[in-house]
Image: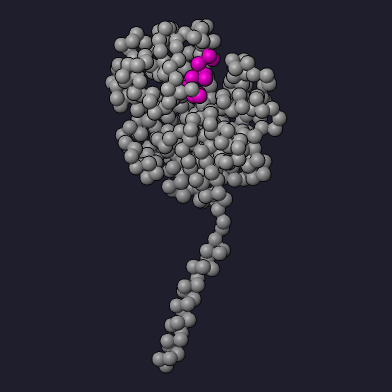
């Protein structure tokens, strides 16, 4: 009896050990996706980390890795090179990229993240800068060499009927931008509005003037979720799955920003939660801009995008004009009912 009991127990133990191996072999295989941010990890992109932390990507059958970016322009070349399948990048720069590489598009926008580009110039009031763009005349404005807000300035200048060289550019890198403004080396700097939170933490906001490009009547779409055309053509279901998970997380980030920032802090522990909550508060105003009340998150108005294409082609003197369907592919957007912004 004891020997039979021992043999039975041993067999049961072996079966128990073998069971996980059998289960792991039958578990569904996740599709890997490499996603590049436009810049470093902050509250601006907290929905992507909330989706990752809550397992929404895995629920959709995806294994998503998220890397820091080198600017919203660089994201396009990263995807075009095939190193990344998806990312976050500037749609005006995508228009320019497609115009310079005619033919079948290598990269397309598939979800409009910033419904309005959060482009602003922040200037020091003690240098005479007000909320009137003309107060920038003769001033020195810092910006990175290849930066979306800087590159879009000619559109503002044309709209306001002022010269492109209304002020002088001082080229700096992103990391030094706050420092040169605080020290007074320059009179102001270009920012994504939500990125300026780092400056607001060092200077009182009443000491600064914020000049949004939208205030000049320039209605540009900003950073969009981009995908390689190889992926949208060969496996559109993967793109649709990524967008469903991300859209879900965007809505939840709006409903509970604290949870979204906490998920982001898990990835980047040095973040200051209070600062990032304020950053996200600004970000979501541009994500859920007025247009989204009509067509939902992630989509665009054709006439607005057509105007943006025309402006980019004209301002940069491009030789070809991409079609809006080439720039923005809405075929994989989540259902409209799931993209509704609650009042």
Q: Residue furthest right?
A: 103
Q: Considering only vertical position in the picture, is 55 above or below 341?
A: below
Q: Residue furthest bottom?
A: 1
Please say whether residue 151 is visible from this viewpoint: yes
Rendered location of residue 110, percent (x, y): 59, 35
Q: What type of secondary structure mainly makes up the magenta span?
A: helix
Rendered location of residue 248, percent (x, y): 48, 41
Q: Quadrant of the C terminus?
A: top left
Residues in magenta?
146-155
Front residue of 277/164: it is 164
Front residue of 215/173: it is 173
Residue 77 falls within the magenta-colored stretch:
no
Q: For the image shown, how many numbered marks are present on the structure? A: 0
Q: Residue at x 64, y 37 (%)?
A: 229
Left/right of residue 261 with respect to residue 153 in the rendered view: left
Q: Residue at x 42, y 22 (%)?
A: 172
Picture quarter containing residue 272? Answer: top left
Q: Residue at x 49, y 30 (%)?
A: 71
């Amino acid at each position: 009896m004891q020997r039979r009991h021992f043999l039975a127990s041993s067999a049961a133990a072996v079966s128990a050990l073998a069971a996980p191996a059998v289960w792991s072999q039958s578990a569904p295989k996740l599709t890997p996706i490499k996603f590049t941010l436009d810049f470093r990890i902050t509250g601006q992109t907290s929905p992507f980390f909330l989706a990752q932390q809550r397992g929404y990507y895995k629920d959709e059958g995806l294994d998503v890795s998220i890397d820091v970016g080198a600017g919203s322009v660089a994201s396009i070349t990263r995807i075009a090179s095939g190193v990344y399948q998806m990312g976050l990048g500037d749609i005006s720069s995508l228009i320019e990229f497609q115009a310079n590489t005619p033919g079948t598009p290598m990269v397309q926008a598939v979800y409009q993240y910033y419904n309005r580009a959060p482009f602003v110039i922040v200037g020091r009031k003690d240098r005479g800068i007000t909320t009137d763009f003309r107060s920038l005349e003769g001033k020195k404005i810092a910006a990175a060499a290849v930066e979306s807000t800087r590159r879009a300035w000619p559109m503002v200048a044309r709209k306001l009927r002022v010269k492109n060289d209304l002020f002088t550019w001082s080229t700096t890198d992103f990391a030094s931008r706050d420092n040169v403004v605080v020290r007074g080396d320059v009179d102001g700097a270009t920012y994504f509005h939500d990125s300026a939170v780092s400056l607001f933490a060092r200077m009182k906001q009443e000491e600064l003037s914020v000049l949004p490009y939208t205030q000049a009547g320039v209605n540009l779409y900003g950073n969009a979720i981009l995908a390689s055309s190889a992926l949208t053509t060969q496996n559109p279901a993967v793109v649709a799955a990524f967008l469903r998970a991300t859209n879900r997380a965007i809505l939840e980030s709006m409903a509970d920003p604290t949870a979204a920032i906490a998920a982001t802090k898990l990835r980047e522990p040095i973040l200051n939660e209070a600062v990032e909550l304020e950053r996200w508060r600004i970000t979501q105003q541009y994500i859920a801009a007025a247009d989204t009340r009509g067509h939902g998150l992630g989509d665009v108005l054709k006439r607005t995008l057509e105007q943006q294409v025309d402006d980019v082609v004209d301002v940069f003197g491009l030789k070809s004009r991409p079609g809006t369907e080439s720039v923005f592919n809405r075929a994989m957007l989540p259902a409209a009912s799931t993209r509704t912004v609650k009042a």
